[in-house]
Image (cartoon, grey):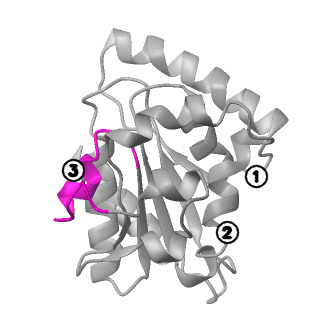
Amino acid sequence: MYFVLLLLILWFGRLRPGKGGYPMAKTVAIVNQKGGVGKTTTCVNLAASLTALGSRVLVCDFDPQGNATSGFGVDKNCSPNIYDVLLGAAAAEKAVIHTRWADVLPSNTQLAGAPIELVSVPRREMRLRTVLAPVVPLYDYIFIDCAPSLDLLTVNALCAADTVVIPMQCEFFALEGLSELMGTLKTVRQKYNRHL
């Protein structure tokens, strides 16, 4: 696991926006519908490592458990948070909390209700991409830490991202879940985000 994490840090570390790389933030969704595979750990460590290398990094905690939020020492009960941003009650710029390891768009259990509240919103699959658009030019990397599910929040993360990292364990059931996730990625690529 740590060897793969080191390779990811080296890979992302060599891709510098504006220096022969891509012109705006590299947006990475860290996804797996299986819990306990290291999504949040990967997200927090990649973000902190890239910040230490001099990159401007934003972590969007898109998991109602809010573990990435607390992993950066941010109070889960702070407001505004990603829930408020997603529903249009606050701008992303106002919700970002600056830490010494990375900037964080915090999350808490309120986010679990967002898929129900987004049902009537037009283009609800693109909501995260829309609300993050104003902050994208401010960062080199944006990491989206996803919940262990394949719900509307995960689809939003995939629509907002241009890269996907899938942490997984080497076991049969993980491979079974990977095939479902690959099907979801294919659908998102075809219908919503051909750059994924």
Total numbered circles: 3
> Mark 3 highlights which residue?
2
Q: Quadrant of residue 30?
A: top left
Q: Earlier in the sequence, mark 3 or mark 2?
A: 3
Q: Which residues are magenta?
A: 62-78
Task: List x then y, in percent, for residue 155.
Answer: 62, 36
Please name the residue shown 64% across and 62% down the image. 131
Please name the residue shown 59% across and 35% down the image. 117
| SS state under label 2 | loop
Task: List x then y, in percent, for residue 65.
Answer: 28, 39
Q: Earlier in the sequence, mark 3 or mark 1?
A: 3
> Mark 1 highlights which residue?
195
Q: Quadrant of residue 189?
A: top right
- Identify whether 181 is placed above or below 190: above
Please name the residue shown 43% across and 25% down the image. 33
The one nearer the camera, 182 or 98, is 98
Give the amino acid at mark 1: His
Give the Cα separation between the discs numbered 3 and 1: 28 Å
Give the amino acid at mark 2: Ala
Task: List x then y, in percent, for residue 156.
Answer: 62, 42
- Identify whether 139 is placed above or below 117: below
Give the amino acid at mark 3: Tyr
Q: Quadrant of residue 151?
A: top right
Q: Nearer the viewer, mark 3 or mark 1?
A: 1
Q: Nearer the viewer, mark 2 or mark 1?
A: 2
Tag 1: Cα neighbours inside 10 Å, few (<14), some, or many (≥20)?
A: few
Numbered badge on residue 133: 2
Q: Earlier in the sequence, mark 2 or mark 1?
A: 2
Q: Quadrant of the N terminus?
A: top left
Is 33 positioned to the left or the right of 87 in the image?
left
